[in-house]
Image (spheres, rainbow, N blue to C red):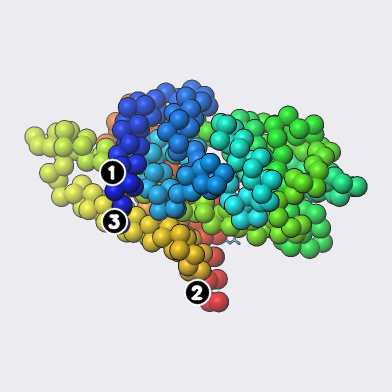
């Protein structure tokens, strides 16, 4: 991938910020599980939280290639921190696609003031089958009344702006879903239990409970019944950010393992000299490079509006995150018993990597999408 001069400058800035301010705190925030507000402020001040806000509303309107480049850099050191950026880049998509001028002015304005966002689709009975959501939005007079229970809402307990998907016509399933926005503290919106997760421990993922949450018509984004279309557009973008997270984490884990293998001696020589480990590094490096190519190719397709991006983004997400899980597991193997302890970051990386195969559509669902696109 050839980057422009501006992109290289931005990448170098991000690299420096990550080395100086993010990487040194990654183990601590993983251990405490505390939400990293300092990192949010750091990214906000560096303009990284506004990469996808259109320029006419005060953002940077960056390409997905740039977003993927930035996310890859941060993911090398800390997947939780990179998740903040992935969310910032993808959560604005429903507004970009279908928001009115007033909605964009209001919501983008709040994000530019520092508000965090949350997108809530998943429910207890609707995970992979997003069209099966049961949360009901009933129009009464000039307001929609929302009732239901949402699960796995990233930023659920720390966001100020929520994008919630609910059914306005349950009998129409996917064609009856609509997208709404609301603010923290709205009567009827309660943050429920926070998930106690295996990895990405410094992210906040909660349940959301909606009890007679009344939203004026103006809070409906796009047309009634077009919500699934907006959810899928957002997920398509999220597949690219997840793929970049996979490439970044895998590269970080590999680099750490190679450094370790150069230092660690067994049988009187550095373990890096054993061909058994060199073959592992060769496989890691080759598959990471292939994943990077797929990811940037899909990002470029997204930027130019190539319809093949649906297949491309699913391939990139599926391949890059499978590569990431393998690379993180192999990095632990290279460190032997020490890799299995919290003294080295590869233990955290292996736990964090697992998420990438699950969220933004599991890798089984990505394979379904690729198959469907091939057979169209
Ligand atoms: C940390 C974290 C953060 C998240 N953040 C958000 C968020 O911000 N907003 C949000 O809305 N959601 C979020 N999610 C939810 C996430 O997108 C879902 O967990 C995911 O889509 C899978 O749904 P599920 O967990 O219900 O699994 P299920 O759909 O129950 O799947 C269980 C298993 O069955 C497989 N499976 C299901 N259907 C098929 C099929 N047709 N063919 C083959 N295999 C199949 C799946 O691949 C999986 O292996 C988050 C999840 C996690 C863990």
Q: Residues within 10 Å of mark 2 (few under 14, many from 20)?
A: few
Residue that extends furthest to the front in the rendered view of this protein:
56
As drawn, the label of residue 2 is 3
Q: Earlier in the sequence, mark 1 or mark 2?
A: 1
251 relative to 303 in the view: left or right: left
What is the C-alpha distance between the residues marked 1 and 2?
Answer: 33 Å
- Helix, strand or loop status at disc 2: helix
Q: Position of residue 346 (x, y in %)?
A: 34, 36
Q: Quick one: 51 or 105, which is closer to the camera?
A: 105
- Answer whether residue 264 is visible to the viewer in this image: yes
Residue that extends furthest to the left in the rendered view of this protein:
268
Give the position of the C terminus as an image quadrant. bottom right
Residue pictured at 55% horizontal, 47% vertical:
56
As drawn, the label of residue 374 is 2
- Helix, strand or loop status at disc 1: helix
Are discs 2 and 3 less than 8 Å apart at CB? no
Give the position of the N terminus as an image quadrant. bottom left
Q: Position of residue 55 (x, y in %)?
A: 51, 47
Q: Position of residue 78 (x, y in %)?
A: 40, 35
Instruction: Select label 1 or label 3 by which is in front.
Output: 3
Residue pictured at 76% horizontal, 57% vertical:
224
Q: Position of residue 35 (x, y in %)?
A: 53, 27
Q: Quadrant of residue 39?
A: top left
Q: Earlier in the sequence, mark 1 or mark 3?
A: 3
Q: Which residue is mark 1?
A: 254
What is the C-alpha distance between the residues marked 2 and 3?
Answer: 29 Å
Q: Is residue 345 above or below residue 254?
A: above
Q: Residues within 10 Å of mark 1 (few under 14, many from 20)?
A: many
- Answer whether residue 309 is visible to the viewer in this image: no
- Helix, strand or loop status at disc 3: loop
Residue pictured at 63% horizontal, 50% vertical:
95
């Amino acid at each position: 991938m050839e980057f422009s001069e501006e992109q290289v400058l931005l990448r170098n800035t991000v690299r420096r910020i990550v080395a100086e301010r993010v990487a040194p705190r990654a183990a601590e925030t993983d251990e405490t599980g505390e939400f990293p507000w300092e990192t949010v402020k750091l990214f906000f001040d560096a303009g990284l939280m506004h990469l996808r806000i259109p320029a006419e509303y005060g953002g940077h309107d960056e390409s997905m290639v740039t977003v993927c480049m930035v996310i890859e850099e941060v993911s090398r050191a800390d997947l939780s921190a990179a998740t903040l950026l992935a969310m910032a880049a993808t959560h604005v998509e429903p507004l970009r696609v279908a928001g009115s001028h007033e909605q964009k002015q209001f919501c983008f304005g709040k994000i530019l003031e520092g508000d965090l966002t949350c997108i809530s689709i998943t429910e207890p009975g609707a995970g992979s089958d997003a069209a099966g959501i049961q949360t009901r939005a009933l129009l009464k007079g000039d307001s929609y009344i929302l009732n239901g229970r949402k699960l796995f809402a990233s930023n659920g307990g720390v966001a100020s702006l929520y994008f919630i998907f609910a059914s306005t016509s349950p009998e129409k399933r996917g064609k009856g879903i609509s997208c709404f926005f609301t603010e923290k503290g709205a009567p009827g919106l309660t943050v429920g239990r926070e998930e106690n997760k295996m990895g990405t421990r410094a992210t906040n993922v909660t349940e959301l409970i909606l009890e007679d949450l009344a939203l004026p018509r103006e809070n409906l984004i796009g047309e009634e019944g077009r919500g699934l279309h907006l959810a899928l557009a957002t997920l398509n973008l999220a597949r690219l950010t997840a793929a970049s997270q996979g490439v970044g984490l895998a590269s970080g884990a590999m680099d750490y393992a190679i450094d370790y293998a150069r230092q660690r001696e067994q049988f009187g020589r550095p373990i890096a000299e054993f061909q058994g480990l060199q073959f592992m590094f060769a496989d890691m490096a080759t598959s990471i490079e292939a994943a990077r190519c797929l990811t940037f190719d899909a990002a470029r397709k997204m930027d130019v509006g190539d319809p093949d991006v649906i297949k491309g983004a699913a391939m990139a997400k599926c391949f890059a995150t499978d590569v990431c899980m393998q690379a993180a597991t192999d990095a632990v193997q290279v460190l032997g018993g020490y890799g299995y302890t919290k003294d080295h970051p590869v233990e955290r990386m292996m736990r964090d990597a697992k998420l990438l195969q699950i969220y933004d559509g599991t890798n089984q669902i990505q394979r379904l999408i690729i198959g469907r696109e091939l057979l169209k």
